[in-house]
Amino acid sequence: MRRFLNWIVWLPLAAIAIAFAVANRQWVTLSFDPFSRDAPFAAIDMPLWALVFFGCFIGLAIGWSGAWLAQGKWRRAAREARVEVLRERRESEILRQQTRAREIVPAGDLSA
């Protein structure tokens, strides 16, 4: 069912992206020089669709990075909780072993 829903969502999106790329094949100049329009210092020529897709990709990467950094405190808390659980399990196991050892030797029988 989930695979079917993925096809229903992603297939139309892929068709739209392909149609966008085919419709926007003209080349544009992306310039990083605000002072010289005729002979820019740093410029890149690329198809318009590549520029749009690259911008979307950069936006997604920045968003994912921001979310990852914002969730750092939760990852740290989970790591500390995991260490605490392991410490408590070890202590519990030690106490169980000590309890079993006491049950083996009767409390009033010291002759052994």
Image (cartoon, helix red, strand yellow):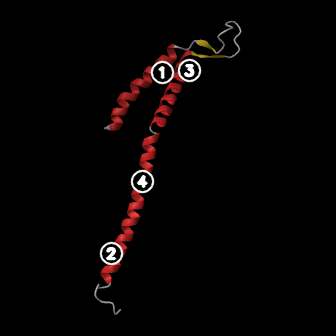
Determine whether, in the image, residue 22 is placed left or right of residue 33: left
Amino acid at dot 4: Arg
Which mark identifies residue 18? 1
Q: Decide: marks 3, 2 in contact (CB < 8 A)?
A: no
Task: State the CA–CA distance, disc 4 to disc 1.
Answer: 46 Å
Amino acid at dot 2: Thr
Task: State the CA–CA distance, disc 1 to disc 2.
Answer: 69 Å
Q: Earlier in the sequence, mark 3 or mark 2?
A: 3
Relative height, residue 27 to residue 103 (above, below): above
Q: Earlier in the sequence, mark 3 or mark 1?
A: 1
The residue to which callout 4 is attached is 82
Relative height, residue 79 to residue 89 (above, below): above
The residue to which callout 3 is attached is 50
Q: Decide: marks 3, 1 in contact (CB < 8 A)?
A: no
Q: Decide: marks 4, 1 in contact (CB < 8 A)?
A: no
Determine whether, in the image, residue 76 is placed left or right of residue 9: right
Single out the mark in the foreground, 3 or 1. Answer: 3
Task: State the CA–CA distance, disc 3 to disc 1.
Answer: 11 Å
Task: State the CA–CA distance, disc 4 to disc 2.
Answer: 26 Å
Q: Earlier in the sequence, mark 4 or mark 1?
A: 1
As drawn, the residue found furthest toward the top would be: 38
Task: State the CA–CA distance, disc 3 to disc 4.
Answer: 45 Å
* The one of 22 and 101 positioned closer to us in this rendering: 101
| Residue located 53% across and 22% down the image | 55
Amino acid at dot 1: Ile
* The one of 36 and 112 positioned closer to us in this rendering: 112
Single out the mark in the foreground, 1 or 2. Answer: 2
Amino acid at dot 3: Ala
The residue to which callout 2 is attached is 99
